[in-house]
Amino acid sequence: MNKPVEASAATLTGAEAVVEMLKAHGVEVIFGLCGDTSLPLYDALARLPHGMKHVLTRDERHAAYMADGYARVSGKVGVCEGPSGGGATYLLPGLVEANESSIPVLAINTDVSVSSRGRFTLTELDQKNLMRPLTKWNAVLDRPADIPRVFRKAFEEMTTGRTGAAHIALPFDVQNGPVDRSDIWADPTLGAYPSRRVAPDAFYVELAAKLIRNSKNPVFICGGGVVLSRAEAELAELAEKISAPVATTVSGKGSIEERCALSVGVVGSNGGTPETRAVVDAADLVIFVGCRAGSVTTERRRHPAPGRAKIIHIDVDPAVPGTNYKVDVPLVGDAKLALSLLNEMISGETQRDLSPLEGKKHEKFRKFEALAASEDTPIKPERVVAELQKTLDKDAIVVADPGTPCPYLSAYYVVRGTGRRYFSNRAHGALGYSLAAAIGAHFARPKVKTVAVMGDGSFGMCVGELETAVRLKLPITFVVLSNAVYGWIKAGQKSGYDKRYFSVDFGVTDHAKVADAFGVRSWRVFEPSQLRSILKNAFEHPGPSLVDIVCQPLHEARAPVSEWVA
Ligand SMILES: Cc1ncc(C[n+]2csc(CCOP(=O)(O)OP(=O)(O)O)c2C)c(N)n1
């Protein structure tokens, strides 16, 4: 029998303190998987009246992805937990994705007792050093008394400045020791992000306003920072005032209503097209907002071409402006505050001829629609995107895995409205993210339809969580684009290695049958003409549903794939 310290009027156990600290920061849901070292924590969760939901997952990687999806959609910190050893190494992929994507995710990683350290204890590993380079902040607790302070610090780190992930190692005996009740307090505003906005230097704001006033052809390139900062209204106001096109990265989708005249769509080597690239190339001023100007967005610093356009770079992280481009004006601060200061400085309206932009968009979608209308089998990815667009409500949340889903949906799925309605794991692009992230997203916005779109390579890496969706009766639809190949890589072998295909093909699986065995309502589609009604049925199904679409392999798809594979 476990013997924790007796809770009293003055003290509670470490495990109870953890639960109280999460509650005090406004946590609503915890995603995780049990283990020996987590038993006191689970017991505290079972006993205390905290009101938080615990979602049992089928592996810790997906617990972290669920916390990530939840955080992206809710605007709050996502919390996951797992045990020592394998739990730590399995939490890691989700934590690093969240951190690099600036998503506040807290991992509570239980650990062997402090008193057992260094004795070849089963599952012992150096969690501090394992997680240090992968998280924004991490700590290993050695004493129960430190729990309240360490949790306050974790929430502050996750939601201020460049937001990111935190990791706390919670040893077994620390969970059983005493914590002073009077130390259980928190600033609940640190449970949501961004919690403490910082404005850029007024001097630089003035310089930026001057550059904008003098530019002939400004263009915005927005990264995930606009949606993270909820700066969509300020961005629209400024873009409309100066009549500037707004392009986004994959993570920046949702910065602007994509049906509006100023929206360019996605740029870069994963979802950009020659037409969106041309809009960037025509600019004499590029305003990066909440965007790292990384290899995918800028096609390895070729678009915009260095030195061709002036650069204003707005980012909350001082390390970002100037890293990939020589910046004319760095605006270091929160995107919402930076854009509203620029709005104050720039009065009046500038009218610009938007017909070139309109022409480019028309050209892009003309090519797309011709392919989307195809009745060919296997079904073309363009057809799948078009049918999703037609059948999904504008408030639906779409999560895309790498492979075929991310570039095609990023390019052609038009986000109606602003905010987080579409996302993918663009930091590391690990296959198998979307299924779990969609589960997290559902907990953040349960009233809207959530759809995960994955390749069959991804399906193989996440299928176990179908059980979680069935157990919790979640009305999420999983769409699998089946082509029995790691298609994105095969496309790279086609375009860059003279079709020397090597070890990229795998066997055909009937994913609908697999899903059916889990208890998921499922369909397998071969004919384009069946797609719409089957997708509709799947979306209307009150529980989990899966549509397995036998799809054209990426290496056989049309030319832009070779442009996408950078
Ligand atoms: C965990 C992981 N391993 C390897 C890769 C490299 N990778 C990128 S795309 C891709 C192929 C994706 O295959 P699939 O999910 O079947 O989609 P398709 O490209 O065929 O549409 C691979 C292997 C990755 N992104 N993530």
Image (cartoon, helix red, strand yellow):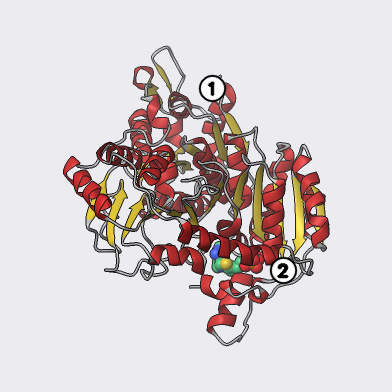
In the picture of the structure, the residue carrying the numbered disc 1 is: 50
Give the camera-side residue of 393 and 521. 393
Q: What type is the residue that disc 2 sits on?
A: Asn
Residue labelled 2 has its Cβ within 8 Å of some atom of ligand 1: yes
Give the quarter of the image for residue 395.
top right
Indicate left or right for 436 with 548 as reference: left
Indicate left or right for 526 with 455 as reference: right
- Name the element at disc 1: loop
Q: Position of residue 177 (x, y in %)?
A: 41, 28
Q: Tell me the residue at 59%/51% (across/down).
A: 414
Q: Position of residue 561 (x, y in %)?
A: 58, 72
Q: Position of residue 155 (x, y in %)?
A: 38, 35
In the picture of the structure, the residue carrying the numbered disc 2 is: 483
Indicate which quadrant contains ligand 1. Answer: bottom right
- Name the element at disc 2: loop
Q: What type is the residue that disc 1 sits on?
A: His
The mark closer to the camera, 1 or 2, is 2
Which of the two discs, 1 and 2, labels the residue nearer the N terminus? Answer: 1
Residue labelled 1 has its Cβ within 8 Å of some atom of ligand 1: no
Most distant residue in the top direction: 9
